Amino acid sequence: MRFAVAGAQIQAVHWPISFFRVHSAQKTFNMTACVVEQADVRDRNNVVEPSIHRRHTIQSRLASALDSEKPRVALVSAKLPTIFSPDSAPDLARELARTGFRVELLSSTDETADDFDLAVFLIHLQDERGAILRMRDRDDRIPTVGWFWENHHRVVENAASAEAVDVVVPAHAYATSYLANRHSLLSPAVALCVTQWSKREAATFFARMGLQERSERLYCGSCGLSTPERLSTLVDELIEGGNTGVYVPKEQEPFRTSASNSAQRFEEWSSHKSSLCLPAGTELPTRLFDALLTGQVPIVPGGVPDLNLVVPAALQKELPIIRLEDYSVRSVRKAQLAALAAFERGGEAGLRRRHEYALNQHMMAARVETILGMVRQISRRPVAPRRRPNGID
């Protein structure tokens, strides 16, 4: 970037002058971190964004889409059958109707008549880009928003999908800048949330099960097939050690199998006082919100950059949320004892406070309402001149 500012000329030499070594400690070994850092460096010199004409086009499309009394919104998730409660669709429709939107939760727009005013695609890296382009081919008047649930990895696929939508909404704030492009408007990040229960279910289940007798065993769900070695090793050590009482449940069937499945899972979560919420990397684990919703005291590793952005530090102490010092059995045991002590100090009032906080702030309806509110603001925002810090284009 400094070369570009100075007007340097790039030329190739035709003989080798160095060798490149591949090893686990190099920066490019973690390509996601490398690309995110590169984008941050780029942004210090030149912010990549759509032209004034393109931004005006997007804003006009959004303004037209939101012009009706109750705009109809398609909320599209290819993972609808596996990560959402059966009650999610009616619950979202009911909750968002209060804000003046008609929201339909769909697994695809391929089989629907495209009479929506706006489409919000949840980008799970399930070829959503193809689905967006197919919808555009049928009717390019419908503006599209991409909510990027996996923007903390597989950066090439995410970047391609970002160029296919009108508005980009990252889920993980720390890995945002690389999504900027000349076709889409980049909005602030909107974190992930509870999906395995609807707001109605959570309130109903908590009233019935939230105050049941709870185990002091540390609740720790399965980490999945893509779990990094350090996490799977820690979980294995916790299980083999026995003295921490860590419990890893069996994998559940898809969430939408039945309403009784949702109730059984809520009962299992709410039968524990504390929960170990392990992310695959440094992303904010969604299990944190599940733990709070069911009244548990969650334990989250240190080094999760988005935690303070989503849950203010003062509130983390009040709820509380316990931070894990490192990925060792000793640290887990120490954090577990702190979580159990905090649970006992807070009593029923603390348990209800955690549940109500998650219920009111971190359910799917609240997130969608935030996104639609941002989209409405974008549609009304004056078109500003482009920012070019060092005059590089």
Image (tube, rainbow, N blue to C red):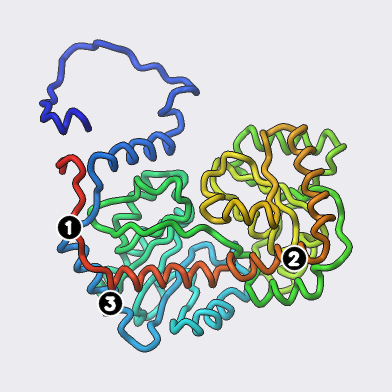
Residue 126 seen in the current view: no
Residue 2 seen in the current view: yes
Q: What residue type is labelled 1?
A: Pro
Q: What residue type is labelled 3?
A: Ala
Please rate how many residues cluster around mark 2, counting C-alpha atoms within 10 Å: few if below 14, some from 14 to 19, many from 20: many
Secondary structure at numbered mark 2: helix
Which residue does the numbered mark 1 point to in the structure image?
A: 385
Secondary structure at numbered mark 1: loop
Which quadrant of the figure contains the C terminus? Answer: top left
Could you tell which of marks 2 and 1 lies nearer the N-terminus? Answer: 2
Whether 363 is drawn above or below 336: the answer is below
Q: Where is residue 171 in the image (x, y as percent from the top left)?
A: 47, 55
Which residue does the numbered mark 3 point to in the structure image?
A: 63
Q: Pointers 3 and 2 in contact (CB under 8 A)?
A: no
Residue 59 lies left or right of residue 90; in this view the side is: left
Could you tell which of marks 1 and 3 lies nearer the N-terminus? Answer: 3
Q: Pointers 1 and 3 in contact (CB under 8 A)?
A: no
Give the CA distance from mark 2 to mark 1: 50 Å
Whether 122 is drawn above or below 234: the answer is below
Residue occupying the point 35% across, 55% down: 161
Residue occupying the point 89% across, 62% down: 213
Which residue does the numbered mark 2 point to in the structure image?
A: 266
Please rate how many residues cluster around mark 3, counting C-alpha atoms within 10 Å: few if below 14, some from 14 to 19, many from 20: some
Q: Which amino acid does label 2 sit on?
A: Phe
Residue occupying the point 69% across, 56% down: 318
Residue occupying the point 35% across, 17% down: 20
Say which quarter of the image contains residue 354.
bottom right
